[in-house]
Amino acid sequence: MKKKIETISTSIRNRKKRNTINVEEILKTSLKIIKENGIEKLSMRSIAKELNSSVGSAYNYFETREKIIQELLFRGEQKLYQDVLIAKKKAKDSENELVLIAYAYWNFAIENIELHKLMFSVGGGQHKKLFTQPNSYRIFLKSIYSYTKKQKSKKIKPKDYNSLARTVWSWMYGLLVLNMAGVLTKGSATYKPIEDGMNFFKRLIDNE
């Protein structure tokens, strides 16, 4: 009988300890679940199981699974936006600005792989609902647009500026996907895909 009482007492203490989770743990665990099992497996129950806590603990911070995803997207967009702004401020000229902003995207995606996938996944549509046009994306397009306009290219007409800007962003995204998939051809240790792509882009529009 004594052993049973001790077991119940220990269980109560452990349950209280497991219930002391916080927002950061929930978000970190959510990304882990998405990485290992896919976003469709993310639920309050799977989060609670991973954290060894009660399901109700997560509900203390987030009303629904969708709220967790939204918070991850907001944080991801805020971080990427700040990275892009910093890159823009460091730029010496419009040409350098393009390269630095591209690297800001690149580094963010490499350092936050699962978050980047979640932000730009076309499956759930959450990102589009939250951001009609994300600020990070807008700055990237504006920088490309400004550079193209400044060059007064004879090859690219003003009516094509927006299309060109979207094409360059798509190239950047595709480059990231290739790198994450491990199929990006590096060629040598000195190969720099960002500079290589940007140089090609500039040759397309410059008056040569």
Image (tube, rainbow, N blue to C red):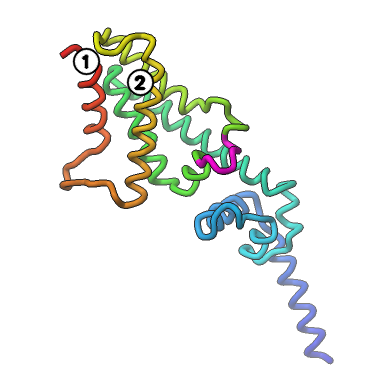
Which residue range is magenta in the image? 121-127
- Which numbered disc flags the more N-terminal residue, 1 or 2? 2
At x 22%, y 38%, the residue is: 192
Residue 84 left/right relative to 10: left
Can you tell which quarter of the image residue 163 is in?
A: top left
Q: Residue 1 in the image: x percent, y percent?
A: 84, 92
Residue at the right extreme, as displayed: 1
Can you tell which quarter of the image residue 70 is in?
A: top right
At x 40%, y 28%, the residue is: 86
Q: Considering depth in this image, is 41 or 44 the residue closer to the camera?
A: 41
Give the alpha-carbon distance from disc 1 to disc 2, as whole Å.
13 Å
At x 82%, y 90%, the residue is: 2
Q: Which mark is residue 140?
A: none
Height in image: 1 above or below 184? below
Q: Which mark is residue 164?
A: 2
Residue 205 left/right relative to 3: left
Q: Secondary structure at mark 2?
A: helix
Question: How many numbered markers are drawn?
Answer: 2
Residue 8 left/right relative to 157: right
Height in image: 57 above or below 111? below
The answer to whether residue 110 is magenta is no
Q: Which mark is residue 206?
A: 1
Q: Residue 109 in the image: x percent, y percent?
A: 41, 42
Q: Amino acid at mark 2?
A: Leu
Q: Considering depth in this image, is 2 or 86 the residue closer to the camera?
A: 86
Is there a contact, CB below 8 Å, between mark 1 and mark 2?
Answer: no
Q: Mostly what secondary structure, the magenta segment?
A: loop
Residue 169 left/right relative to 19: left
